[in-house]
């Protein structure tokens, strides 16, 4: 199922990553690539919020992981998995906010990618994260 960014008041140059049911259920999330650096976005809905009416930390961590994995696979079809992910919460985001992710590759090795990202809402950093991402290489037809 392909979702349209315009339906979530997200700029139309973003695109939907097709095929990850969990990200669609939690998000949906959208992205575009600027060279090898991803920008990601999602619109906060009431279902993303916790008892304090701010975005639940688990939603933000999932969105950060999405952004970090885009760093590792360059927005392409290469399969990747998160080995470790560290997050620091800086400020809240609320219903109707547009949350942007900005990712950056720190080091790309043959099998591991080290990346970091910032999540931003209302021109304020709300979360910073770093991760080690494993590149899954297909071998012998598997």
Image: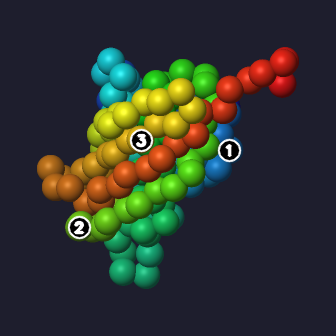
What secondary structure is found at the residue carrying circle 2?
loop
Question: CB of mark 2 within 8 Å of CB of mark 1?
Answer: no
The N terminus, quarter of image: top right
The C terminus, quarter of image: top right
Cα–Cα span, label 2 and label 1 = 28 Å
* Farthest-out residue, front: 110
User: Residue at 16% of width from left, 55% of height from top?
Assistant: 124
Cα–Cα span, label 3 and label 2 = 24 Å
* Farthest-out residue, left: 123
Task: Name the residue tied to disc 2.
Answer: 91
User: Residue at 46% of width from left, 25% of height from top?
Assistant: 74
Mark 1 and mark 3 lie on one chain; the one further toward the N terminus is: 1
Can residue 132 be spotted in the picture? yes
Label at residue 21: 1
Q: Residues within 10 Å of mark 2 (few under 14, many from 20)?
A: few
Label at residue 79: none
* Farthest-out residue, right: 141
- Above or below for 89 versus 7: below
Front position in the image: 109 or 123? 109
Front position in the image: 74 or 51? 74
Position of residue 129 measured from the top left corner of the image (x, y, whole percent): 35, 55
Label at residue 114: 3
User: Residue at 78% of width from left, 21% of height from top?
Assistant: 139
Position of residue 102 measured from the top left corner of the image (x, y, whole percent): 30, 39
- Above or below for 13 versus 56: above
- Above or below for 33 versus 112: above
Q: Nearer the viewer, mark 3 or mark 2?
A: 3
Q: Residues within 10 Å of mark 3 (few under 14, many from 20)?
A: many
């Amino acid at each position: 199922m392909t979702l349209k960014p315009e339906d979530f008041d997200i700029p139309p140059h973003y695109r939907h990553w097709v095929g990850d049911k969990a990200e669609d259920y939690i998000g949906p999330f959208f992205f575009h690539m600027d060279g090898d650096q991803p920008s990601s976005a999602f619109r906060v809905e009431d279902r993303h919020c916790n008892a304090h009416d701010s975005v639940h930390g688990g939603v933000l961590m999932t969105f950060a992981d999405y952004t970090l994995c885009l760093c590792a696979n360059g927005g392409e079809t290469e399969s990747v998995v998160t080995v470790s992910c560290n997050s620091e919460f800086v400020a809240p985001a609320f219903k109707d906010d547009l949350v942007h992710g900005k990712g950056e590759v720190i080091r790309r090795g043959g099998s591991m990618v080290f990346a970091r990202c910032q999540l931003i809402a209302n021109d304020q950093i709300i979360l910073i994260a770093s991760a080690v991402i494993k590149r899954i290489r297909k071998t012998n037809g598997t």
